[in-house]
Amino acid sequence: MKSRIWGLVALGGALLSSTAFAGTCKNLVLYENGQSKGFMEESTRSFPESPEWSTNWGDFDNMKSPYIRLSGMRNYRGDWTGSLIFDALPVTVQGGALKLKVRSTQAGNFGVWLSGVGGNGKISFHTLEAGKTQTLEIPVSALLEGSTVEVDKIGIGLFNVPANQYTTLFVDDVALTCVQETAVSASTVAGEEAPAEIEPYPFVNVDPASPVREGLFEDVYERPVKSRYSASEKESLKASTQAKFVIPEESQMRILGFKDAESLTAKDSWRGWYNSMFLVEKGSLAEGVIPNSKRLFDEAGELAAMSDYTVLPLLVANMDYGVAYCGDSSCTKREIEDYRLTLVGLSSPQVSASRVRVAYDPYFAIAPSGKLPMLEICAENKCLELKPGSDGILEFGSAGLQKILVKIHSDNQTFEQKLFVEVK
């Protein structure tokens, strides 16, 4: 546990740390045989339909199923583009090439590009023949400037697609041929001594479906949540629903009031995640289904405080429950509707710097199904994509109350939520 705690303390002084690269050049497969997870960034997608990530339309000569499929049709001529984000990204490349296989049901103009720290690189255009698989190998130097660059997205597009033409694009076997291993070293904070090496954010290897969390701090008070239902009421509800939690309509309205709020104080925004989870937990029909949200909320806050509020673990919920609505005027009958809650919270109402590290640690996620969403977090019109077990830097342009837009990508759906934080 000491190494985990020290990692967070060290990160407080590492926001401007330098990065040194070491290791041999190696090939990295980003997508193959439908095994690699990923998503298409919604803010850049103009493809008519969302991609299917592991589809099977049969084998096409040297393209074997499963593969990524993008399809659609529009009533006007135009370009279809989008950025693919895979689990292995971001990575640092030094030369080498981007390799991929593409196939289209219609002849057309295909483009591919890389995105890095400096933005989008050059587009490499290729003419596709209808019903023919092409294997492309494009030097990274032709896509992004610099001998060593960080790649965080793969951009693809079909250009000048005719109106009223249904087109399907298949993509498979995406790889970068020269990826460098990274080692993080520390830069010294003025007036302070720094260790020779700074540990990255110390993620915990925990199954998000597990209700058990190892406990980071002995002094964190774990407040038990008492169910709102008696034993007989629980049995009655279990007979009418498969849901593990059932909450009344008024509790649902309070949760949605936080989730859909366009404006909040920093304190209300900070407490909203826990307040919402408390209402859900009170509706429990079974014990030990999820970890105690109060404990996770308190532990995340302590970690934020240890970094002097320069590192914020995110609190995430992705779970199902039932909402009990009145089925008659006297409310003696109840109708239960299923609801999926996707919710993100901050571990502090304030931050003490304009550049803050946010971490998507599965330890602080509640997901009984085991499925965690992908997150896209935007501040000052700059967005940061996070997958479970990753972190990144969020920047604010000024002090005071700041808005953070969170896009939550779950099961081919995108939900938006606004959070608010005070920048000191």
Image (cartoon, helix red, strand yellow):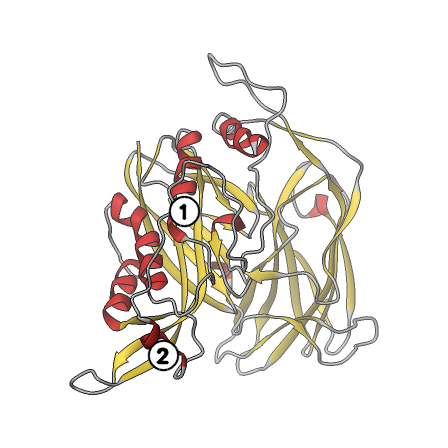
Q: Mark 2 is on which residue type?
A: Leu
* Other-residue count near label 2 (Cα within 10 Å), few / some / many at <14 / 14–19 / ≥20: some
* Other-residue count near label 1 (Cα within 10 Å), few / some / many at <14 / 14–19 / ≥20: many
Give me the C-alpha separation between circle 2 and circle 1: 28 Å
Is 13 placed above or below 170 here? above
In this view, the residue farthest toward the bottom is 328
Is 325 placed above or below 421 here? below
Residue at the location (53% across, 66% down)?
369
- Residue 49 visible, this angle: yes
Q: Nearer the viewer, residue 122 or 95?
A: 95
Residue at the location (72% across, 65% down)?
172
In this view, the residue farthest toward the left is 330
Q: Nearer the viewer, residue 77 or 342?
A: 342
Q: Give the residue number, with chain letter if any, for mark 2.
A: 237
Q: Mark 1 is on which residue type?
A: Arg
Q: Nearer the viewer, residue 78 or 413?
A: 413
In this view, the residue farthest toward the front is 231
Q: Nearer the viewer, residue 144 or 335?
A: 335
Q: Give the residue number, with chain letter if any, for mark 1.
A: 295
Q: Work out which quarter of the rendered image holds the N terminus and state it.
A: top right
